[in-house]
Amino acid sequence: MIFKITVLLLIATISDIIKAQFFCKNRHGKRVDWFVGYKQPKNKSQIYPGATFHYADQDSTEWGSAENLKSPKNAIAVTLKQYYGSKKQKPFYFFYNDQKPNKESRSHGNHAHAKGVAIFGDTSGFWLIHSVPKFPSLKHYFYAQNGEIYGQSFMCVTLKTTSIEIFAEAMKYIYPAVYGMNVPKTFLARFPFLNDLKQLKKKNIANTSLMKNFKSNDGMIFYNFAKSDKYKKDLYSDMIARQMKVSLFTETWMNGGAKDLDSDCSTAYKVMNVMELNVAGNKFANKNDHSKWAIAENETKPLVCVGDINRQESQKKRGGGAVCFESVNIWKLYKESIVEIENCKV
């Protein structure tokens, strides 16, 4: 009898350990190391107007078939479902968005211009970076109506929990607007630096920018860029292009009241704005896209970045960042989506 109880307890313990893992997932529920996603601008001719989403991961050579962001069977919903179904476990979670998903409509200008979610269990977790205002909800999955009109970008990376410091350090630099957080005592015991995250305050740190390499759960190298509001420079031309030593094509929001930054060819590493795109057969102008991504100009160094910041004068004074990686296949998907770029002024 004692043996039977011991076995049952062991099984329960193993089950809890297994449940204490979180991963990026595709729409079929398969664990993946990372993925990127593109939500199309709203078009009445689409099969899912305002919610058409295309997915790609390490095995992709083209954008996946259309997924419905309003359905529970898309990669974003399936990935987040792990959190919504884990409330008894109370994992580490951290939700941030400069436009929080509640009745409050104003943008939190004192905080980073950044949106994302991080969920970690005992052994693994994921970091989801996106551009959708007021998304996602803390309580259950639904795609925010205000995210329908414009295009939106997504990236999810699976990490070992022992790599949680890379996320925490980035948050310290950018100072995001947090609307949901849980830091378990077990995490504080393992990772004392999370105390700074739990009591996140705007601090005067010695450096105003951060660039660090990190590895995904499967060992792929990523580059984490973060800047504080004190950096006061463009994320793409002054940080990413210079540090990675590549010229960039950038697709960011250029449809607000802020002064947009022109394409810049003044240095060895150019940064050129994308003006028109065609993603999975849907052609649209930059003004209809709220995404934030950048790629290297050439395939020689197939850099792909997804992040937070727009190329606008006001964004120099906002915290934010980007996560980058190298993949020929994914680089080609973004490169082939570019129809027109803004030439540099002579």
Image (cartoon, rainbow, N blue to C red):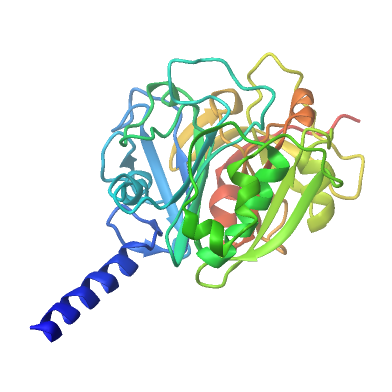
* x and y, in percent, of residue 75 in the image: 36, 49
Is residue 273 among what the camera can see? yes
Task: Give how far across and how far down residue 338 sits, in percent.
Answer: 60, 41
Q: What residue is shown at x 48% (from left), y 64% (from top)?
A: 58
Quarter residue 11 falls in: bottom left
Question: Up-down: is 195 above or below 139?
Answer: below
Quarter of the figure with the N terminus: bottom left
| Residue at the image position 55 percent from the left and 64 percent from the top | 190
Name the spot of residue 236 as percent of width and height, x first. Answer: 76, 42
Number of residue marks: 0
Left or right? Give the position of 91 relative to 151.
left
- Residue sitting nearer the eye, 95 or 184: 184
Q: Position of residue 289 (x, y in %)?
A: 55, 29
> What is the quadrant of the C terminus in the image?
top right
**Of residues 327 and 196, which is closer to you in this image?**
196
Tell me if residue 305 can be seen. Answer: no
